[in-house]
Image (tube, rainbow, N blue to C red):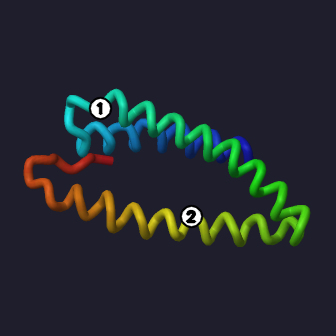
Amino acid sequence: MRFLLGLTAAGLTPTVNILIKKITPAAITGRVFGFTMSAGYLGVFGGAVLGGQVTAWFGSRYVFIVTSALLLMNAVWVYFNVYKKLQGHKDLKPIQS
């Protein structure tokens, strides 16, 4: 599982950085990248603590349920706050996969 996490993180991080660069004004790009990295590492720390607490209270099965719910909420938030914003920019070129 750690191997798959590493593969997905390796592909996700550059993609997120490209999206941030596209929707952030040039004057504050460095600051936004700093906030993004800080939030990512806070998530790594907080996820480990939250996962440990959920496992201790409810069992390991519920770690996956809680993680799924959090990822679903994040996907909905990204759709409405990032994807819609990118659709509003006519000057942005789509990212080719």
Is residue 46 found left or right of 19 in the rendered image?
right
Is residue 63 found left or right of 78 in the rendered image?
right
At which x and y percent is residue 22? 24, 41
Q: In this view, does 16 lie above or below 53?
A: above
Residue 90 figure quarter: bottom left
At which x and y percent is residue 89? 13, 54
**Which is nearer the eye, 42 or 10?**
42
Q: Earlier in the sequence, mark 1 or mark 2?
A: 1
**Residue ID for mark 2:** 71
Cα gap from disc 1 to disc 2, whole angstroms: 26 Å
Give the structural element (helix, strand or loop) at label 2.
Answer: helix
Which label sits in the foreground, 1 or 2? 1
Is residue 26 found left or right of 29 in the rendered image?
left
**Residue ID for mark 1:** 29
Taking the spot 25% from the left edge, 41% from the top edge, the residue there is 24
**Which is nearer the eye, 96 or 33?**
33
The kind of residue on which mark 1 rests is: Thr
The kind of residue on which mark 2 rests is: Leu
Q: Is residue 70 above or below residue 22?
A: below
Is residue 79 found left or right of 27 in the rendered image?
right
Label 1 crowd bin: few (<14), some (14–19), many (20+), radius 10 Å? some
Taking the spot 63% from the left edge, 39% from the top edge, the residue there is 6
Residue 16 figure quarter: top left
Residue 45 figure quarter: top right
Taking the spot 63% from the left edge, 68% from the top edge, the residue there is 68
**Which is nearer the eye, 27 or 97?**
27
Taking the spot 34% from the left edge, 27% from the top edge, the residue there is 30
In the picture as drawn, the residue positioned furthest to the left comes out as 91
At which x and y percent is residue 11? 49, 41
